Amino acid sequence: MTHSAETVLAEAHGIQDDLVRLRHRLHQEPEIGLQLPRTQEKVLEALDGLPYEITLGRDTTSVTAVLRGQGAYSSADKPVVLLRGDMDALPVQEQTGVGYTSTIDGAMHACGHDLHTSMLAGAATLLAERRAQLAGDVVLMFQPGEEGFDGAGVMIREGVLEVAGRLPDAAYGLHVMSALESNGRLATRPGTLMSASDGLSVTVHGAGGHGSAPHLAKDPITAAAEMVTALQVMITRQFNMFDPVVVTVGVLRAGTKRNVIPESAMFEATVRTFSEANREKLQHVIPRLLAGIAAVHGVEVTVDYSTEYPLTVTDDDETVRAESVIADLFGSERYSRMAQPLSGSEDFSRILAAVPGSFVFLSAATPGSDPLKSAFNHSPYATFDDNVLGDGAALYTQLALARIAELAAVVS
Ligand SMILES: [Zn+2]
């Protein structure tokens, strides 16, 4: 462990109680989407008195905080590093029974973003204390609306990547998990880390009629049913099994009464891919397949394929740097490089598409529990252990410090 990493970790653990308090307050008042006024208030309170230049979102309650380092650098440009923590909750009714349980009906921090917010606020304190020696600027990105609202896209449009005066040299994010790995373990991988997420919405237009006389109608239900299974068969026949595709139909709707053939039937699916090539291919093979099935049944179909979050791809070099920071802080035995990507999606992908960076998973599973049996993120039973808060704050801090030190030392 380097001297710097050792001090950062000790200081982060020193503010652990503050981080727990903040996290519990955030957890008790979860807010969903792009408008998180009470969350924003708590973040601003945590940053109060620290030497940050603060910009609030115009269309959202984002908080962007820039720390202008005062240390000397020999690089041509002053280094800039961006750290991101998302802040939004989910429309889930909490069932954990923890003492600091959600007080808002139908809303819960079920994905642990309350931990990210608290960790990044902790890093704000630790970084500010080092401002005099810090040979670069740090951009803290407190982001709303990660859960399907593209908060990162909005913040990019509102200028988060230019707020320091130039594009960041590197960007890092982290995500806690309530299961899969045992408490305190860290993981990431270079390259494709998470899938792209797209949406498919299909309507089959038939002709309604009497259920006893289908030959006088055009049944949209049998055609829709065939489409749902044909999609699965098509994936196994037309896509490389080593470059996976997931199409899950989560909505299927038609009809009002068992003896009435309805006018139309509809279904919606989430589409996950791990390569841009497959993503593009799906956008023409899905409509072709569904139009073919519609044609043989004599019905019409409209297919709407909408792109949502892109692939989350970490930079090879930045991931190696993150791995060395992790080893420095926590020892390499707590880390494993993931053999495969995760089939979730992230809007931090938009930042990583613009700036080289990495994204690290940190397990906050209950200590001593079997992580394979614990409730996973998004479950009403998912619990996240407070003890990782200090580690998360230290990780954010050290990622920025190490990268800035390296960049600043480049003689130009
Ligand atoms: Zn999340």
Image (spheres, rainbow, N blue to C red):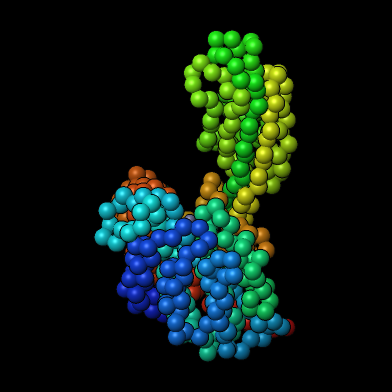
**Across the whole image, how many numbered discs are drawn on residues?**
0
- The x, y position of residue 255, in whole percent, is 53, 25
Residue placed at 54% from the left, 18% from the top? 260
Front residue of 264 and 48: 264
Residue 125: name its quadrant.
bottom left
In this rendered view, identify the residue nearer to me: 27 or 182: 27
Would you place residue 131 above or below residue 201 in this image?
below
**As drawn, 83 above or below 217:** below
Q: Is residue 42 left or right of residue 401?
A: left
Q: Is residue 353 visible?
A: yes
- Quadrant location, the N terminus: bottom left
Q: Quadrant of the C terminus?
A: bottom right
Residue 376 shown left or right of residue 201 in the figure: left
Say which residue appears at 47% left-offset and 70% top-offset: 40
Asked if one can make out residue 293 in the rendered structure from this viewpoint, the answer is no
The one nearer the camera, 5 or 261, is 261
